[in-house]
Image (cartoon, helix red, strand yellow):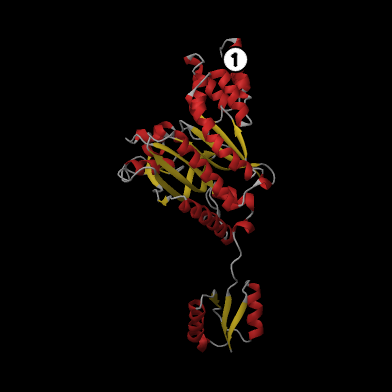
Amino acid sequence: MALQPAAGARDLNPREVEGNRWLCDQLASVYRQWGYAEVAPPLVERLETLEAGGGIDDREVVRLAADEPLGLRPEMTASIARAACTRLATRPRPLRLWSSGTVFRSGTSDSGQHRLEERLQSGVELLAALAEPVSAADTELLRLLLACLRRLEIGSQHRPTLLLGHHGVLTALLDQVPGEQRTATRQALINYDPLSLASLDLPGHQRQGLQQLMRLRGEPEAVLYQLEQQLGPVPLLDQLAETLKVVAPAAMAQGVRLQLDPSFQPHYDLYDGLVLKLVCQGAEAPVAIASGGRYDGLVKRFGETDAGLGFSFDVEAIRELLGTEATAPERAQALLVAYRTTTQLAEALQLLERCHAAGERAELLHQPCPSEEEAALIASDRGCGGVRWLG
């Protein structure tokens, strides 16, 4: 029998489980305050939904052996968008939903072997009417993200950077590139691959402009100015500037650095508007703890004309960033209920339940114990806070 979990899966100890639960509870409390209702998308979905119209590479989906094409969810946005456009289609907009649960991704290890990646995710989805101002939904999403950071006490000591981009802005920049070169140019930009960009068959001045674009990232106001020089007056830039005008002061007050990067795109190609990633400085390297964006096109695939946007937190990345001890507040230690002879077992169980009825944590010692002193030693070894002794 196998003694180790599958590659990519993990056994969590009680403190890690408590830390994950505490973080999810903290985030849920913020979501509820902002008017978001909990939903529970299925672990198993049809591949057509999981692949989100090509936004998610099917090689990353864990497939199941079934009569129809099924797989495990690699993220929850597509499933929630499907439900919002079908079972929840008659609910008034904006529709605010949140969820937490495990997601699964298929991948390849450094040695070339197939592995399963299992992560705990918590996040929100906001479905709004397209007639509403774009900046209102985008701003709510970013301010909600900042509110979550305040609740988790993630601040300047963690050097958080909120990396922002916009799919529409990147598309507008790429429209200046010959059609046959756009896909390769896009990949070179979002992967920050100057060698691939240099090898493209482009006019010299255009290649030089794209190389400058690849390096264009930083303080939003300065980047927006540079984009205006390249694109001229574009409504997307005005909307983005309006959103950042509301978000920037709150981010600065929390010690969150904003960085605008026109070539940034998240891992999944779900998005067609604002995109985001939140990165903090871990003990040894930067840690990405949240990502998301706007996905109007995905909603349209499910037959609705709503705007869709959301973000998700990587709960275990946050726990590792903050430390398990910080994210799993120490609970009151349990009492150990012990007894001297086997004839006292029934009485010991009654005492145990009286402790529970009084709101105390208590556990039962199964074997008789000859003395209260020995019971106290056993309680200490087990990490119990005291003994209730039947002698």
Nearest to the observer: residue 283 or residue 4 = 283
Q: Quadrant of residue 227?
A: top right
In percent of width and height, residue 194 lies at 62, 22
- Asked if 310 appears above or below 316 in the picture, the reply is above
Nearest to the observer: residue 378 or residue 2 = 378
Kindly give the residue lying farthest to the top in the view shown: 203
Position of 271 compared to 389: left or right? left
Residues packed near mark 1 inside 10 Å, few (<14), some (14 to 19) or many (20 plus): some
Q: Is residue 109 visible?
A: no
Q: Secondary structure at mark 1?
A: helix
Nearest to the observer: residue 175 or residue 371 = 175
Position of 293 compared to 288: left or right? left
Position of 130 compared to 255: left or right? left
In percent of width and height, residue 21 lies at 52, 57
Q: Residue at x 60, y 62 (%)?
A: 329
Q: Residue at x 43, y 50 (%)?
A: 35
The residue pinned by badge 1 equals: 207
Q: Residue at x 44, y 43 (%)?
A: 125
Q: Quadrant of the C terminus?
A: bottom right
Nearest to the observer: residue 16 or residue 111 = 16
In percent of width and height, residue 135 lies at 47, 35
Q: Amino acid at mark 1?
A: Arg
In percent of width and height, residue 6 lies at 52, 49
Q: Is residue 332 visible?
A: yes
Q: Quadrant of residue 282?
A: top right
